[in-house]
Amino acid sequence: MHLLVTGGAGFIGSVVADQLLQAGHRVTVFDSLIKGYRAAVPSGATFVRGEIHDRSALEALMTAGKFDGILHFAAFIEAGESMREPGRYFQNNVAGSLTLIETAVAHGISRFVFSSTAAVYASKDAPLTEADPIAPANAYGATKLMVEQILDWYARLKGLRYAALRYFNACGATPGRGEAHRPETHLIPLVLQVALGQRSHVEIFGADYPTPDGTCIRDYIHVADLAQAHLLALAALDQHPRLILNLGNGAGYSVRQVIEAARQVTGLRLPAVEKPRRPGDAAILVADAGAARRLLGWQPRITDLHEIIASAWEWHRTHPHGYVAAS
C-alpha cells in the first residue's frame, strides 16, 4: 500500500514510518517540521513539507499520491501548554485534523489511523478500559476527543473506516530514532538530560496526589511496541470499520519510580526538586489494553521500565543534542 504519515518527522510518527517501510509499504511523510525533525524521517520515505491546515497542499498531495490510507500523528501534544494556550491547540489539533479528514474523504481514502490519547479519560485508580468515563482533564485531551468524534461522524456519514488508538507515555528509542521535543517536557528525556549534565535537576510537579508516593502515575509504553500496534490496526480495518482501542502495558509507574529507575540505569544520582502541581495533570492514567490484544493480536515486547529507559539512554548518549547533532 501507499500510506501517508502526517507528523512522520516526530517521535512516534517516524518510528511508524520506518516500520511501514520495513513491512514493504510505500510511505510519504507530511510534516511541517514545527515540532519534528527532517533527520528523523526514514531514508526510504518520500518527504513533503506542509501544514495539515493547508487544504490546497493536501489536495495536491493526495491527487499525486493516490494513498490507500493515512496514519495521523500531526498534533501539538503538551498538556500543560494546552492549558495556557487552548486556542492554539484547538486550531491545530481539531481544525487541522478536520481539514485532513475532509480532504481524505474527498479523495476516496477509506482507511484512517488516528493517534489519540488516554488523556480523554477521567483519572482512575485501576487500569482504564474503553468503556470508562470520558472526561479530559486538559485541553489537549479535549482536542483528541473532538477528533475522535469527527471521525465517528465521517464513519457514519461517509463510510470512513478508522482506528482511534488511545495511549499515554510513548518512550524508549529505536536505532536512530529517539525522543527530542522543542522544548522538552516529557519525563524520561528530561531525567536523561540531567544525566548528560544539560540540566541541574529534574522537577517533580506535584507530590501530593492520591497515589502511594504522592506523584502522578502513568503507563509507559515503548515506541516500537506502539508503532507495531498502528500497523496491526491499519490491517484490521479490513475486518473492523471502527476501532477504538487502548494501548499500554497495563502497569503504571510514578514519577518517583521513573526517576529511581533512571538512576539505576545511568548509575548517577540525578537530583530531583519538588514543584507545585501543573494544571491539567490527572493523578493516574494506566491503560487496560485487553481489547487491542484480542482484536489485533498485539503483544508489547519491551515492558520492563529499566529496559525502556536503557534504550532511551543509549539514544540520548549518542545524540546528546538530539537530531541537531545527527543532521
Image: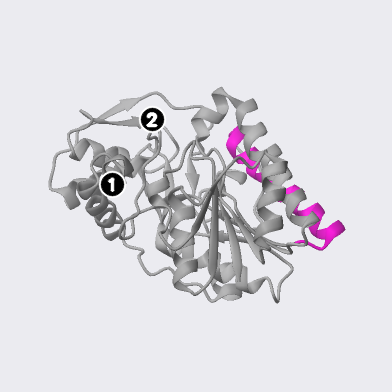
Q: Residue 200 in the image: x percent, y percent?
A: 20, 28
Q: Residue 312 in the image: x percent, y percent?
A: 29, 52
Is 143 covered by the magenta stretch? yes
First in residue order: circle 2 vs circle 1: 2
Quarter placement of the C terminus: top left
- Closer to us: 289 or 6: 6
- Secondary structure under tag 1 reads helix
Q: Main secondary structure of the magenta part?
A: helix
Residue at point 31%, 62% (across, down)? 304
- Closer to us: 223 or 38: 38
Which region is colored magenta? Answer: 137-160
Kind of residue indicated by mark 1: Ala
Kind of residue indicated by mark 2: Phe
Residue at point 49%, 50% (across, down)? 168
Number of callouts: 2
- Secondary structure under tag 2 reads strand
Can residue 146 be seen at all in this image of the molecule? Answer: no
Is 103 covered by the magenta stretch? no
Q: Nearer the viewer, mark 2 or mark 1?
A: 1
Indicate which disc residue 326 carries.
1
Q: Say which residue label 2 marks.
A: 205
The residue positioned farthest toward the right in the image shown: 157
Q: Residue 31 in the image: x percent, y percent?
A: 53, 45
- Closer to us: 236 or 213: 236
Relative side of 233 to 150, left or right: left
Quarter placement of the N terminus: bottom right
